[in-house]
Amino acid sequence: MKLALLSDIHANIQAFDTCLSHARDHGAQQFALLGDFVGYGGDPVAVVERAQELANDGAVLVKGNHDAMAVAPPAEVKAIGDSTAAWTHDQLSVSQLQFLDNLPMIRQQSTILLVHASVDDPELWRYVYDQRSAGASLDAAVHMPDVRYVFGGHVHQQTLYYRGAGLDLMKFMPTPGVAVPVPKHRHWLATIGSVGQPRDHNPQAMYALFDTDKLQLTFHRVSYDHQAAAAAIRAAGLPVFFAERLEVGR
């Protein structure tokens, strides 16, 4: 079975639909959506509608920090991430807000654990960006029965960590489109990158495919109409910065 892993869509329907199509073309049979459906982008309604459709078809979803902020926007904007929460809240229907609010923080499927940020106190939205933080997340996960794989987002980067013979984690930077063997005798943690807002100076969308039969994980980069996504941000009257960053992938 091929499981498509998508995270940090950020109200970018162009990137979302392109990644879904790419995943299906590459044999995806199930979808896991790892949070941050909204925030920053100009099409939160369309993205949440698509997520609801996928959930109705059996996709597994977890909540991201921007989803939580859209449900309950901060009273004061203190960081760039807070700046579109109130606008997003006003765009979404009551039922869509309830949908986001009811999403779980973590989900386990057999040997796979899905989370937006870190398994270590997921509600604190800790970033998993190095071996230390990956180790804390993995340590929290391996106490759960049968978990061998942790998949998350939040950091907008594609990185794979694994625990070898010792206690230290090894960090691996994958090559897009190249399958990486991930055998069950090790513990693995991957941050799968951002569908809707890449930040590595490459505007191509990110997602990953996990082949549970071959035990291979493939990270993908996909070109999409980022100009249309940027135009949607401008048309919505959101800060131009969010449009500009899509155009250069920063």
Image (cartoon, rainbow, N blue to C red):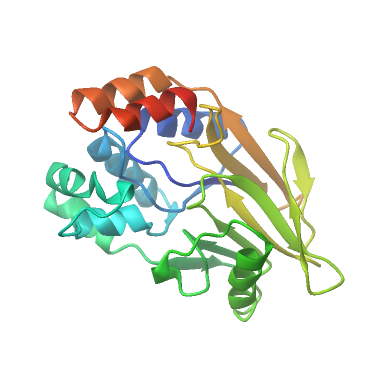
Please name the residue shown 29% across and 20% down the image.
231
Is residue 111 something that shows in the picture? Answer: no
Residue 140 coordinates in the image, percent (x, y): 58, 77
Please name the residue shown 59% across and 56% down the image.
129
Please name the residue shown 31% across and 39% down the image.
40
Q: Is residue 62 above or below residue 156?
A: below
Residue 241 coordinates in the image, percent (x, y): 33, 30
Residue 169 lies left or right of residue 96; in this view the side is: right
Residue 215 coordinates in the image, percent (x, y): 75, 53
The furthest residue to the front: 78
Residue 19 coordinates in the image, percent (x, y): 50, 32
Toward the viewer: 178 or 127?
127
- Number of disc labels: 0
The image quarter containing residue 38 is top left
The image quarter containing residue 235 is top left
Q: Is residue 147 above or below residue 19?
A: below
Residue 87 lies left or right of residue 170; in this view the side is: left
Toward the viewer: 241 or 61?
241
